Amino acid sequence: MEDEIRRKRLEKIETIRETGADPYGRRVDGIEPIADVLARFEKEEEGVKAKVAGRLMSMRPHGNLTFADLRDRTGRIQLGFHKKLLGDAYAYIKKKVIDPGDIVTVEGEVGRTKTGEVTVFPESYVLLAKPLRPLPEKYHGLKDVELRSRMRYVDLFANPESMEVFVKRTKIVEYMRRHLSGRGFLEVETPMMQPIPGGAAARPFTTHHNALDIDLFLRVAPELYLKRLLVGGMERVFEINRNFRNEGVDRSHNPEFTMLEVYEAYSDYRGMMDLTEAILSGCAKEINDDYRTAFQMSSDEEPVEIDFTPPFARKTYDELFEEHVGFPRADEEAVRKKADEQGEDLSLPVPVLADILFEIFVEVHLVQPTFVYDYPVEICPLTKAKQGVPEIAERFELFIARTEIANAFTELNDPVVQRQRFEDQLEGTGVDGEKAGKKIDEDFITALEYGMPPAGGLGIGIDRVVMLLCGVPNIREVILFPLLKPKETAETRIESIEYGEIDLPIDKLNNAEEE
């Protein structure tokens, strides 16, 4: 069927070219966004003319009148093609040389139909692009999440809700930039390829630089480079960019993801709490005009209302651990026993086992925005210990809808202690010996030896923020082109709707009889 449609479309293109027209047009000036046309018509009603461009999403022929829906980036408007207004040019409409999916520009008067629908009645139209493939059928077309991710170019025009998600994503990032710039932060860029993967305990992607003959790693985090800037005197910096982690894929993880990282000299993790709260509550209000948003955490659960109204809840790691696991985290024997019951590897350090139990038994309860703070120092190699309590690190994670959204520290700035933490991590006595880096970043230690001011550091997962504020449960639906396993023959067939594709001999085109 699709091959037949393609053949007929190619015949139509040839028909158009033989009349001297170009089915793939050029620049068009004077176009007005559809949303602006609708707003202007609501105010003026009489004598409104408009020139709009976009994709024809449907066509409904009625003899010498054909209605169509035109969509651009701002919205949708009805078109009313009429023979009295178009003359001979109406033959292309009547004989269906113009199809749903075609990209056109039209110019004409705006009015209302008998049913009250705002409609542009074209006095002229120009074909700008003739697709060879049909539109997805309205109700049964491009709905599968994987297919939508593979064919985002179709998803965006076929599903207005997808376009809305990515428009909101842009606005979320814009708000974050504006908010931080207003506080005196400088946006910077740091290397995407690094000689030593640092800043997070994650498996990196590797590559090789031929000219320098060195192995490099796609960054897992920009942290160590941003801290170098603190040493250099850039006291407030942030970066919005991609990180890469060669690990699993699920509804909240993609190997390539976008992070906001912020570092502020003379601050600490509590300052970062206040900043995180301001950014996220401000985003919610800016994007949805409300602090509350609905979010479905899993397919077998009803949506819940997430409330971003500040202040967010604040609870310690140990307080939540004892409440939901059932015993104090400091009880190492109980931790090992519980971990063994869960089938965990008992060769892992006790703090790591405890953190696994936290993930299993505590995070499921963290639905509303909750700052979890004061983590075990053993799992925080880059974090300053709490004053007077050396076994506790000044770190927090923000959980919303059972998912980590942000992570922040009072940054460790003692080079001697930092070296020891790195060495512990390499020996497997830190976060996770198996996933720890293979080298100490000596240049970073050197930078610390020149003196880094006390500072707070923050990372916010932008993809996950977009998921929450747009009510989207899968990270693939908020990334324009998420990483997917290639298919040898990608299945791209989608249910389509055509309004009577026909063979159209050229000699009949200009002799179309009126109905």
Image (spheres, rainbow, N blue to C red):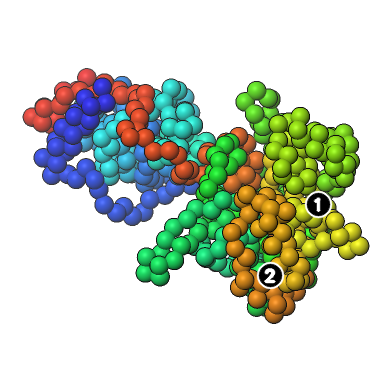
Pick the front one: 12 or 383:
383
Tell me where residue 496 appears, x and y as whole percent. Answer: 35, 25
Where disc 1 sits, the SS reads: strand
Give coordinates of residue 319: x percent, y percent: 88, 43
Looking at the rendering, in which quadrant would you find the C terminus?
Answer: top left
Q: Residues within 10 Å of mark 1 (few under 14, many from 20)?
A: many
Farthest residue, direction bottom: 450
Q: Residue at x 54, y 58 (%)?
A: 219
Q: Tell me where residue 60 appears, x and y as whole percent.
A: 34, 24
Reading the image, the residue beneath label 2 is: 236
What label sits on residue 376 in the rendered view? Answer: 1
Q: Amino acid at mark 2?
A: Arg
Q: Earlier in the sequence, mark 1 or mark 2?
A: 2
The residue depicted at 60 percent of the width and 34 percent of the height is 473
Q: Is residue 290 above or below residue 206?
A: above
Does residue 275 sit above or below 18 in this rendering? Answer: below
Against 229, residue 170 (above or below) is above
Amino acid under label 1?
Pro
Q: Position of residue 260 (x, y in %)?
A: 62, 57
Q: CA distance from mark 1 to mark 2?
A: 27 Å
Residue 41 appears in view: no
Residue in front for this viewpoint, 267 or 199:
199
Asked whether 182 or 211 is in front, the reply is 211
Element at label 2: strand
Residue 289 disc label: none
The residue most toward the left is 507
Classify residue 187 by image quadrant: bottom right
| Crowd rating for badge 2 (residues with CA inside 10 Å; few <14, some 14–19, many 20+) | many
Q: How many marks?
A: 2
Q: Is residue 219 visible?
A: yes
